[in-house]
Amino acid sequence: MIREDYMKSLIQEGVPESDLLATDLALREVLKKGDKVPIIAEKGKNKGKTVGYRYEYPNFGAIAKNVSDYIETILGSYSGKIEDAREEDFGENEDIQNMNIDKYDRASYEFSKLDSQNRRVKLFFATIPYCTFDENGNIAIDFSKNEFECPTFAPIEEVYNVIVNDLHTV
C-alpha cells in the first residue's frame, strides 16, 4: 500500500493543470483516486471487523501490466542464474548437474554479486532516482536526465556498485 502523502506528491496535488506537462497529466489521470473501501480483518481478534480504509484506483489498470512487466525485468533479469531444481534431484538426475556445470567452474570474479541478491533488495536498488544537491545542500531529485523532466531511476548496477564500494569497510 502506498502512503497517501506520496500519492499526493506523485500527482502533484495542488498544482494547476495548466502548469503540468502532458506526462504529469497522464500520471494524474491514471492515479486518480476512486472509491474508499473498508479493509476487513481476516484473522485475529478483529476478524470480520473494519480495521481501516483504502482507496481504489480504477484507472491504474491501464498501466498495471507495464508496471508489472518492468518490475519483473528488474527482479528477474540476471544471467548467472542456476536452473531451479529440487535438492533430491541432484543425486539422481545428471542432466540437471550437466545443465549447470558451467556455473560451478567459474572464478568468483566472473559472478555478479548483484545476481545473488534478494528480489526485494534488487527492487530497492532499481527504484533509486538520480539525485543532486540543491543550493542549500539538501538532496533533490534530478529532473534533467530525460526530455520529459520526470524523475529517472539510476541504473541498478551503478547504484549497487556505489553502495557496495562505500560500505565494504563497514
Image: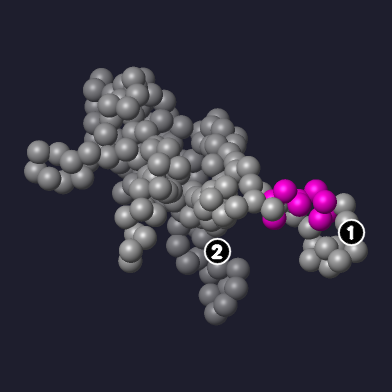
* Secondary structure under the numbered disc 1 in the rendered image: loop
Q: How many marks?
A: 2
Q: Position of residue 133 (x, y in %)?
A: 18, 41
Q: Position of residue 19 (x, y in %)?
A: 24, 22
Dot 1, how many residues are within 10 Å of its Cα: few (below 14), some (14-19), or many (20+)?
few
Residue at position x 56%, y 33% in the image: 66
Q: Is residue 71 positioned above or below 120 on the image?
A: above
The dominant secondary structure in magenta is: helix
Seen in the image, is 13 located left or right of residue 110? left
Residue at position x 53%, y 50% in the image: 109
Residue 150 quadrant: top left
Determine if residue 119 is in view. Answer: no
Q: Which residue is mark 2?
A: 40
Residue 47 quadrant: bottom right
Residue at position x 85%, y 63% in the image: 89
Which quadrant does the C terminus fall into?
bottom left
Say which label, 1 or 2, has the lower sequence index: 2
Q: Position of residue 101 (x, y in %)?
A: 76, 52
* Residue most extreme to the left: 136
* Residue most extreme to the bottom: 45
Does 99 appear in magenta? Answer: yes
Q: Position of residue 62 (x, y in %)?
A: 55, 30
The Cα atoms of the two marked residues, 1 and 2, are separated by 48 Å
In the rendered structure, which segment of residues is drawn in magenta? 96-104
Determine if residue 114 is in view. Answer: yes
* Secondary structure under the numbered disc 2 in the rendered image: strand
Q: Nearer the viewer's eye, disc 1 or disc 2? A: 1
Q: Which mark is residue 72?
A: none
Amino acid under disc 1: Asn
Q: Which residue is mark 1?
A: 93
Amino acid under disc 2: Ile
Residue at position x 51%, y 60% in the image: 39
